Image (cartoon, grey):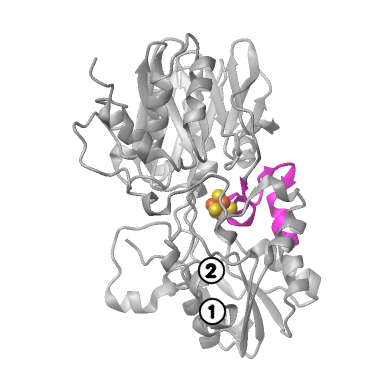
Amino acid sequence: MAPALDKIHEECGVFGIYAPDQDVARVTFFGLYALQHRGQESAGIAAADGQTLRLRTHMGLVSQAFSEEDLAALPGHIAIGHTRYSTTGSCSPANASPIRAECDLGSFAVAHNGNLVNAQPLRDEMLQLGARFASSTDSEVITRLIAEAPGRDWLTKIRRAMPRFMGAYSLVIATVDRLIGVRDPLGVRPLCLGRLEGGQGGWVLASESCALMTIGAALVREVAPGEIVIIDAGGVHSHTGQVPERHAMCLFEYIYFARPDSTINDRRVYLARLRMGEELAREHPAAADIVVPVPDSAVPAAIGYSRASGIPFAEGLIKNRYIGRTFIQPDQRLRDVGIGLKFNPLPEVLRGKRVVLVDDSIVRGTTTPPIVRLLRQAGAEEVHVRIHSPAFRWPCYLGLDVATRQELIAAHKSVDEIAAHINANSLGYLSVEGLLRAIDVPRDEFCFGCFTGHYPVPVQMDLMDKLALERPLPAMAAPGEAALPPR
Ligand code: SF4
């Protein structure tokens, strides 16, 4: 693996389409392409033509994973797609999604974004009943529980399965003749509904609205927390799956995960980040000459900081946008260079300047010191680090792969100690209140788990590990197939 960067890894992206006169596998490919930032380990598409459901999954980026032959082998008018970063289960072909299963209503496939906090007890219970699993993902647990739930129709089955799931799940499901979207009652991960105009029209479900724009669909609305939408020849049918007791949308979707051109809760993510920068400038001013973002995610907040402070914005770091994930190990000399694989400084911009460096988060505290060092080596006189999120003190159990609490630098060090660790002249984090002002959505809509340790669902921290479901399996089914229990 390439040197680990100190970033929170995104979770997954899901996409679904119901469109009678479209090449749905191809549209899904481009929908996933727009959601690539949410997961880069594997990708999959399942398509249905009214009678048969077909599935293709591959490792790697969407653009590498699918060929023209793959898309040609996925005919139909319904398709779902998934791009994965492993939050439960390792990065392996067996864990690629969507997951396909058979049940008494026929074939179906599920693409899941999020993380169940009770996946392990559910899986243990199923194993004791003789179930066999093909993967070590919570997505397969979800798929299996839907398959086994009693019910004469999909709505009943899903409604009966939902109360068993605890945690985050935005699902798109393809059956042979319908497309279904499900969002957990907390609404942790986003899911939106879009409409394709022209021809026979069509409907689209996606993790983020940026995917709708990419394929020429218009955003209709978000799928509500606890809602099930069933899309068939008769249009979109909305149902209550589970009545939410509270909402707990992930704040990091606004801070870092979602693309800035996406809209969540009617808020453009770009503008929310801009306002985070403005709030940060008010909360943590600095006497400086330029404001420099850590590209690309901190650019809008740095512009906001610059606007509110009057300090000019400057690009002092240039990112290698094509670096992606690599499994080629750098040699020792390159490891020593470290962060230089990803960023190069611009000495002409930085020399002699007092710099405000804006970033979205500090997780382990391993990436920021080399970036500060790069700026100083390029001639920066002072470096004042400003973070447009509150300090990340607790792990996330709801769909993000972050460090353990032990590894989180803000769990053990004060702000001054972290400033010393990263060799910054000063350090400031945006407050929770400042963040909420920037997003401008009521406080009770959100999850604050990683900032406060108070999660919206009970978590057994000692059990929560992304490889927790990885244990010797009684028998393995084919990758992407949910193994059925012996009858
Ligand atoms: S714990 Fe943090 S990262 Fe995880 S869902 Fe909640 S707000 Fe998002």
Percent x, y of residue 42: 38, 42
Real-space Cα distance between discs 1 and 2? 10 Å
Residue at the spot of label 2: 362
Q: Which residues are magenta?
A: 249-275
Q: In the image, what residue type sits under mark 2?
A: Ile
Mark 2 residue crowding within 10 angstroms, few (<14) / some (14–19) / many (20+): many
- Seen from the viewer's position, the closer of residues 237 and 270 is 237
Residue at the spot of label 1: 418
Mark 1 residue crowding within 10 angstroms, few (<14) / some (14–19) / many (20+): some
- Seen from the viewer's position, the closer of residues 136 and 161 is 161
Percent x, y of residue 264: 68, 43
Q: Quadrant of the N terminus?
A: bottom left
Looking at the rendered structure, the secondary structure element under dot 1 is helix
- Seen from the viewer's position, the closer of residues 189 and 367 is 189
Q: Is residue 268 magenta?
A: yes
Percent x, y of residue 171: 51, 31
- Seen from the viewer's position, the closer of residues 321 and 249 is 249
Quarter occupied by residue 52 = top left
Q: In the image, what residue type sits under mark 1?
A: Ile
Percent x, y of residue 34: 55, 42
Q: Is residue 135 magenta?
A: no
Q: Is residue 100 left or right of residue 400?
A: left
Q: Is residue 370 visible?
A: yes
